[in-house]
Image: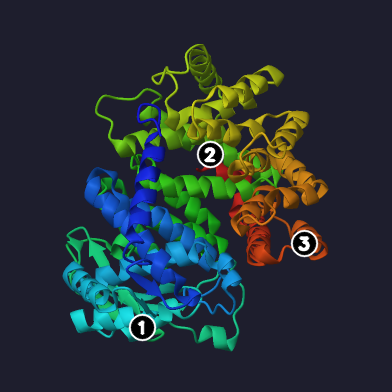
């Protein structure tokens, strides 16, 4: 990439790809898994190591905070589905492994390594790894060999603790069922259960599932040194407090789990949120957990909207990653209810314009890496919720025209905001703007720049131009590795775009299959998500399921199952929102 043109996101991505692949010199090359069912030994560790190395090189990037809203969130989104799989998944034939090169092997695997490091401490963690590498150099191993190395270096029962995390699917929800607040301490009673994204009923066998959970806590004094292991369905933990203080479970988000706290805990934590004594990863996690709990029917939707108001002065990129995910998630689901969608969009617009007032369009001389990422994210949110604001539309058009006149003008249109400005211009324009943006594809000097066009062109409001975008995607003019990006842009542009993309995929399915041929299964997975994802109704899920039964894609069967389960989960979520206070005018007038 060109360092003068590349966005901060692109620079970070290049760094983590390089560090990830270098990690395979140890996990993969020096020591190799005995068989594919331990794929995570390669990919999970490399996913952890990419962040560890990047953090050592660029501590100002806050990679471990970003890990919690990136890798960990991706792992829990997938692992909350019944169509997920354990980290250690049985592989009977080598070709089956294509289906598990996913967020479980990579992101959950990396999250589990992060958890082990937090429990063992860096010294014992590093010593165990070193001994493991020396003992098995140029040989093959299984997961228990690594557990044994860490048991020897730490004296802790690693095998017993980790079996529940790698050998069974899913992760726990820890609920605070009782609390006793005193002047200098709080005693919390905890219960664990399997967390499912749609909160669906569980069998007696499912209800018996449990994990060996390290309970890590923090207060305004910092992370507490005492740690307990929650091995049974319930546990009690006592945490020392400052007068009137707060306590946060799962400090630093080192454990892949959801936490349901009490209203008293939220009230106390709001002080830490507003004063920012609660660290960014933990502030973000409160929102992420709340959104997941609402979706699962375990928390009232109105409580989530009110919790968002505690973040009105938030300026951390890490926390805004969580806020952004919630805004986009709610917008996707509510888009199937025009009245509720209109009310929510007005609130989202108000929230995002508030961030614009803090961050602004212009780069500042003292901007750090995360400030640049935050501005890029903010303009992305403007393109979703505020593109019709007159001042936003005018500013985007001004910058676009300056960029058209001189593509080297990085000040007017830095790479971090280019795709989003293209979207705003497209959404407010017609055929001329469509052709202007598309023209940059042939003018761009590298593929990273071309992707700005691929990711935005489908956001034109004209249905004929949306179809033209999809036809261009399969024309052969776009590299095979990138041809699904325009499909995703059309699908995510609007409800109309979603329907156009799905109809196009059905009509051109044989052509798309022929294009992909024997290429990696992840390409077809990406097409399926880009064209068939995003719907929020059981009827559409049934229609899509019937299509793939008639047109089977065996190598993408797991991705299809996961897409359908997500769709049905979102349909359930929409019904839940429609039966909440969010349906009333009175509620929206108070937020």
In which quarter of the view is residue 450 placed? top right
Crowdedness near tag 2: few (<14), some (14–19) or many (≥20) residues, C-alpha within 10 Å: some
Crowdedness near tag 3: few (<14), some (14–19) or many (≥20) residues, C-alpha within 10 Å: some
Residue 566 is situated, as x and y percent measured from the top left of the image, at: 63, 61
Crowdedness near tag 1: few (<14), some (14–19) or many (≥20) residues, C-alpha within 10 Å: few
Q: Is mark 2 on a helix, strand or loop?
A: helix
The residue indicated by pointer 2 is 347
Q: Which residue is drawn at 47% across and 31% down?
A: 379
Q: Which residue is drawn at 17% across and 60% down?
A: 221
Mark in front: 3 vs 1: 1
Q: What element carries label 1?
A: helix
Rendered view: 291 above or below 112:
above
Residue 248 is situated, as x and y percent measured from the top left of the image, at: 30, 63
Q: Is residue 311 visible?
A: no
The residue indicated by pointer 3 is 548
Q: Is 64 on the left or on the right of 585, as rendered?
A: left
Q: Is 113 on the left or on the right of 298, as rendered?
A: left
Q: Which residue is drawn at 55% across and 83% down?
A: 206
The residue indicated by pointer 1 is 144
Cα distance between the residues tagged 2 and 1: 50 Å
Q: Which of 513 and 226 is in front in this view?
A: 513
Mark in front: 3 vs 2: 3
Extreme residue toward the top, this view: 405
Pointer 2 with pointer 1, Cβ within 8 A: no
Residue 90 is situated, as x and y percent measured from the top left of the image, at: 54, 80
Mark in front: 2 vs 1: 1
């Amino acid at each position: 990439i060109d360092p003068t043109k590349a966005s901060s996101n692109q620079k970070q991505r290049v760094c983590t790809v390089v560090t990830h692949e270098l990690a395979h010199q140890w996990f993969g090359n020096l020591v190799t898994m005995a068989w594919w069912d331990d794929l995570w030994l390669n990919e999970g560790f490399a996913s952890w190591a990419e962040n560890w190395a990047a953090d050592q090189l660029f501590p100002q990037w806050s990679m471990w905070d970003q890990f919690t809203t990136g890798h960990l969130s991706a792992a829990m989104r997938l692992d909350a589905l019944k169509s997920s799989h354990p980290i250690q998944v049985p592989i009977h034939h080598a070709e089956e492994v294509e289906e598990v090169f996913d967020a479980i092997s990579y992101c959950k695997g990396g999250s589990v390594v992060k958890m082990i490091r937090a429990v063992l401490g860096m010294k014992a963690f590093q010593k165990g790894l070193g001994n493991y590498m020396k003992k098995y150099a140029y040989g093959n191993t299984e997961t228990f060999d690594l557990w044994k190395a860490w048991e020897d270096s730490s004296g802790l029962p690693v095998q017993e603790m980790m079996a529940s995390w790698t050998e069974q699917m899913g992760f726990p929800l820890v609920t605070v069922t009782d609390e006793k607040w005193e002047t200098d301490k709080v005693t919390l009673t905890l219960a664990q259960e399997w967390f499912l994204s749609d909160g669906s009923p569980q069998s007696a066998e499912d209800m018996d599932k449990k994990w060996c959970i390290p309970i890590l806590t923090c207060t305004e004094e910092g992370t507490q040194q005492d740690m307990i292991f929650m091995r049974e369905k319930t546990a009690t933990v006592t945490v020392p407090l400052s007068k009137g203080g707060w306590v946060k479970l799962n400090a630093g988000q080192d454990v892949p789990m959801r936490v349901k706290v009490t209203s008293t805990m939220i009230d106390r934590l709001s002080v830490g949120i507003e004063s920012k004594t609660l660290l960014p990863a933990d502030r973000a996690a409160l929102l992420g957990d709340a959104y997941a709990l609402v979706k699962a029917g375990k928390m009232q939707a109105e409580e989530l909207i009110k919790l968002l108001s505690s973040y009105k002065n938030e300026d951390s990129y890490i926390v805004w990653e969580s806020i952004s995910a919630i805004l986009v998630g709610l917008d996707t689901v509510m888009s199937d209810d025009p009245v509720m969608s209109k009310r929510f969009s007005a609130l989202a617009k108000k929230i995002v314009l508030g961030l614009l007032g803090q961050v602004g369009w212009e780069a500042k001389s003292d901007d750090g890496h995360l400030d640049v990422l935050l501005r890029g994210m903010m303009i992305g949110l403007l393109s979703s919720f505020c593109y019709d604001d007159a001042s936003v539309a005018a500013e985007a058009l001004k910058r676009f025209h300056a960029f058209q006149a001189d593509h080297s003008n990085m000040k007017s249109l830095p790479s971090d905001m280019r795709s989003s400005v293209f979207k705003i211009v497209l959404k407010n324009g017609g055929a001329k703007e469509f052709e202007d943006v598309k023209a940059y594809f042939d003018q761009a000097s590298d593929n990273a720049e071309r992707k700005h066009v691929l990711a935005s062109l489908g956001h034109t409001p004209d249905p004929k131009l949306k179809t033209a975008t999809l036809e261009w995607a399969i024309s052969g003019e776009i590299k095979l590795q990138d041809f699904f990006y325009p499909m995703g842009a059309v699908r995510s542009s609007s409800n109309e775009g979603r329907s156009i993309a799905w109809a196009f995929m059905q009509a051109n399915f044989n052509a798309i299959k022929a294009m992909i041929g024997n290429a990696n299964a992840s390409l077809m997975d990406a097409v399926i998500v880009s064209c068939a994802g995003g719907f929020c109704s059981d009827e559409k899920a049934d229609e899509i399921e019937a299509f793939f039964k008639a047109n089977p894609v065996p190598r993408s069967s797991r991705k299809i199952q996961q897409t359908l389960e997500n769709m049905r989960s979102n349909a359930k979520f929409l019904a839940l929102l429609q039966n909440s206070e969010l349906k009333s005018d009175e509620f929206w007038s108070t937020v």
